[in-house]
């Protein structure tokens, strides 16, 4: 599943319309539709912003947001101990 398909699945699972997410994210015209359809690529920063927007609109908890970041491959599924990283 590509990024656009994952965003669509996340949006649909939240029961949101493309228009609602696009408006809340500040997109005009068909931009969000193009992202979901794979016609437009976006940076990881934009993906994070869209996930945050969807989670905010559906009033999800921090854990759901973290899991979405894991699902998109933006963070590791295992929490990292800062002290362990510093020692490595």
Image (cartoon, rainbow, N blue to C red):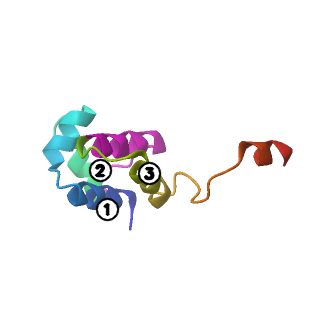
Q: State the residue at coordinates (57%, 60%).
A: 77
In-image side of 10 versus 23 (left or right): right
Whole-angstrom CA distance, mark 3 to mark 1, is 21 Å
User: Residue 24: percent from the left, percent from the top?
Assistant: 22, 35
Whole-angstrom CA distance, mark 2 to mark 3, is 25 Å
Quadrant of the rendering where the N terminus is positioned:
bottom left
User: Magenta residues?
Assistant: 38-56
List the residue tagged with mark 2: 35
| Image mark for residue 82 | none
Label 2 secondary element: helix
Count of picture labels: 3
Whole-angstrom CA distance, mark 2 to mark 1, is 9 Å
In-image side of 69 versus 55 (left or right): right
- Disc 3 crowd rating (10 Å Cα; few below 14, some 14-19, many 20+) is few
In the rendered structure, which disc, 2 or 3, sits on the residue that comes first in sequence? 2
- Disc 2 crowd rating (10 Å Cα; few below 14, some 14-19, many 20+) is some
In-image side of 83 versus 19 (left or right): right
User: Residue 69: percent from the left, percent from the top?
Assistant: 46, 52
| Image mark for residue 5 | 1
Q: Is residue 27 visible?
A: no
Q: State the residue at coordinates (30%, 57%).
A: 10
List the residue tagged with mark 3: 63
Q: Residue furthest bottom?
A: 1
Q: Is residue 5 magenta?
A: no
């Amino acid at each position: 599943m590509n990024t656009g398909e994952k965003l669509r699945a996340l949006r649909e699972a939240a029961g949101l319309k493309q228009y609602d997410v696009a408006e809340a994210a500040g997109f005009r015209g068909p931009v969000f539709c193009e992202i979901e359809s794979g016609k437009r690529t976006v940076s990881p920063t934009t993906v994070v912003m869209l996930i945050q927007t969807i989670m905010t609109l559906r009033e999800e908890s921090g854990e759901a947001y973290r899991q979405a970041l894991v699902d998109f491959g933006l963070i590791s599924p295992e929490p990292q101990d800062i002290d362990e990283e510093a020692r490595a």
